[in-house]
Image (cartoon, helix red, strand yellow):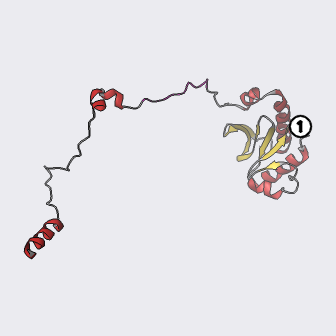
Amino acid sequence: MDSEINNFYHYCMRKPAKRTAAQGRPRRRKKTTAKTAARPAAHKRRAVKTKASPEKKLAPQTVEEYFAAVPAPSRSVMNQIREAIRSVVPPEATEIISYKIPAFKHKKVLVWYAAFANHCSLFPTAAVIEQFKDELKDFSTSKGTIHFPLNKPMPIDLIKTMVRERLGRTG
């Protein structure tokens, strides 16, 4: 009896025989039910859902195109910001579209500015915002953005000072 148990133990504990390359891996059989057997193969594929999207707005290629798309209340504030920046940057600085918003570039991008529904934003970089955090306490700020509400007067002198500081940092 002990030899039977011992043989059974060794039988259960032995390693399975190695398969040859010709035998390949064992394949699982798929369970088929009456429903799956009756369906054609096309019904097994998932249907791709697509949304009927409205016309996509193309990103503006020029600053003039950007300004043309801005609503009138924001456009006047944007022009104030634009003129304040232009009065400080060197004459050889150019206006470009960068990250789908207007920016002034002199050797590299100095500042970005943009219009939104309830505010206009200035993007002078995080270091400049950190330096002027006391003067900006009345405005909503984030790491790299300053929000100027449309219903308050623009701090033109502060914008000019920040752009000068940014210009000094770029060299």
Instruction: Decide: is 71 above or below 94.
Output: above
Badge 1 amino acid: Asn
Tally the numbered discs: 1
**Residue 142: image x %, image y %?**
76, 51
The stretch in magenta equals 47-55
**Residue 6: image x %, image y %?**
12, 73
**Residue 63: image x %, image y %?**
73, 32
Instruction: Decide: is 104 above or below 62.
Output: below
Instruction: Decide: is 101 above or below 43.
Output: below
150 drawn magenta: no
Of 24 and 64, which appears nearest the observer? 24
Check disc 1 and report the residue beneath it.
151
**Quarter holding residue 53:** top right
Of 70 and 166, which appears nearest the observer? 70
Instruction: Decide: is 154 above or below 15.
Output: above
Quarter of the figure that contains the C terminus? bottom right
Image position of 165 (left or right of 12): right
The residue lying at 8 percent from left, 74 percent from top is 1
The residue lying at 86 percent from left, 50 percent from top is 161
